[in-house]
Amino acid sequence: QVQLVESGGGLVQAGGSLRLSCEASGRTFRQYGMGWFRQAPGLEREFVAAISGSGYRTDYVDSVKGRFTISRDNAKNTVYLQMNSLKPEDTAIYYCAARESLLYGGNDPTNYDYWGQGTQVTVSS
């Protein structure tokens, strides 16, 4: 069983920055494909970014390319999402997810085995 705990959400003005963190339990974190998803009120959960176990492969949804960066520190069992130039439309609950496999998780939420509880990000205009 893998537990994921997100932190770093909050209220920020448009144009501001936040860094989300997701700490995972488990001894083989470096093998997990990790992802960030978000869900705004009334909308379906949306893929944001993914990173391979090694950190060499990353992917982003088009709407955050150039503004968000996903990274990981395998020594700390933690994945990050640096969010810059935030927009009101980025407002959502952000979830991290883990795929307990050597396979890359990618943008499909059904590829992931574990989910965190979510952290609220609110961007005011």
Image (cartoon, rainbow, N blue to C red):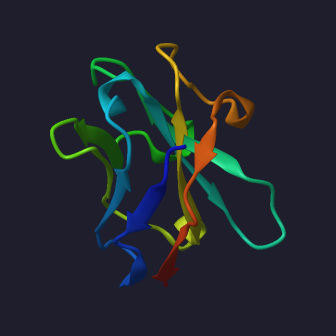
96 over 33 or under it: above or below: below
56 over 117 or under it: above or below: above
Furthest residue in direction left, as rendered: 75
81 over 51 or under it: above or below: below
Residue at point 37% right, 22% down?
31
Q: In this view of the protein, which residue sits in the foreground, 57 or 97? A: 97
Q: In this view of the protein, which residue sits in the foreground, 76 or 71? A: 76
Number of numbered tags placed on the structure image: 0
* Quadrant assignment, res 113: top right
Residue at point 73% right, 53% down?
45
Q: Is residue 119 left or right of residue 84?
A: right
Image quadrant in which the N terminus is located: top right
Q: Is residue 65 left or right of residue 55?
A: right
Tell me where residue 98 appears, x and y as whole percent.
52, 38
Residue at point 70% right, 67% down?
40
Tell me where residue 108 appears, x and y as whole percent.
69, 30
Furthest residue in direction top, as rendered: 103
